[in-house]
Image (spheres, rainbow, N blue to C red):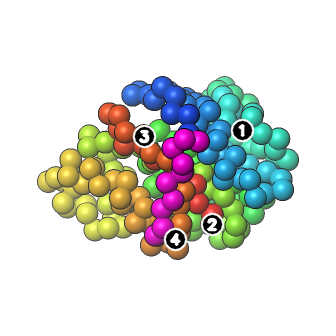
Amino acid sequence: MTAHLLEPDKIFLSNVHQDKVDNTSVPDKVFLRRKATEHLSSLRVLDLYAGENVMWSHFDTERYYGIEIIKGKGRNLHGDNKKIIDSLDLSNFNVIDCDSYGIPFDVLLKIINNKTLQKGTVIVYAAISNRLSGVSKECLKMFGLEQMYKQAQVLIAEKAIELFYAMLEKHGVNVVHYYRIDDNFEKHYGYFIA
């Protein structure tokens, strides 16, 4: 896999968060989305962790659908995207935003395996972890780590972001673009083209 680290001088690196906070580093995240979509003539966005709809309010979108698990938060469809992503027709979207609080391993795996995903779709992601973070069951199963995780959770959690990229590569993603922030967590904000 080829990883392109986005140019640091173009990233604002505003105050980073240590707790779960919606829309931290808005200028950085808007820059990332502009870079990811600069080749698209129109934007048809599926925002899977939409929150208050702040990120995509900075763009002129032809179509925008936000999904949020917290009822009444933003102007969104209320639902758990982990449960509904399999049933969604992704062919109507050319951007899928999967910027969650952790590593959206299971959701991205479902997106990649969704037969309606169109080649050329931009997928924006966040991968945030530290050695005390959990690792998804799907990740453990894919790499045969279920038993080892029971004995060495911290050792496996330290490799969670590497496992995330290994999953993408295993499913045909050969190039990612991202920027990285390290504080109490290792944070990768990036995108790839399906």
Q: Which mark is residue 174?
A: 4
**Relative image position of residue 52 (x, y in whole percent):** 66, 28
Q: Count neighbours of disc 3 (C-alpha within 10 A) and say few if under 14, some if 14 to 19, many if 20 or more.
A: few
The amino acid type found where label 1 is placed reads: Trp
The amino acid type found where label 4 is placed reads: Asn
Identify the mark nearer the N-term, 3 or 2.
Answer: 3
Q: Which mark is in front, 1 or 4?
A: 4
Q: Does the image show residue 51?
A: no
- Is 34 in front, or is 133? 34
Q: Which mark is in front, 2 or 4?
A: 4
Q: Which residue is mark 3?
A: 181
User: Where are the magenta residues, as a range?
Assistant: 1-10
Q: Which residue is rendered at x = 29% and y = 55% of the image? A: 159
The amino acid type found where label 2 is placed reads: Ala
Tell me the CA gap for discs 3 and 1.
Answer: 22 Å
Identify the mark nearer the N-term, 2 or 4.
Answer: 4
Q: Count neighbours of disc 4 (C-alpha within 10 A) and say few if under 14, some if 14 to 19, many if 20 or more.
A: some
Q: Which residue is mark 2?
A: 194
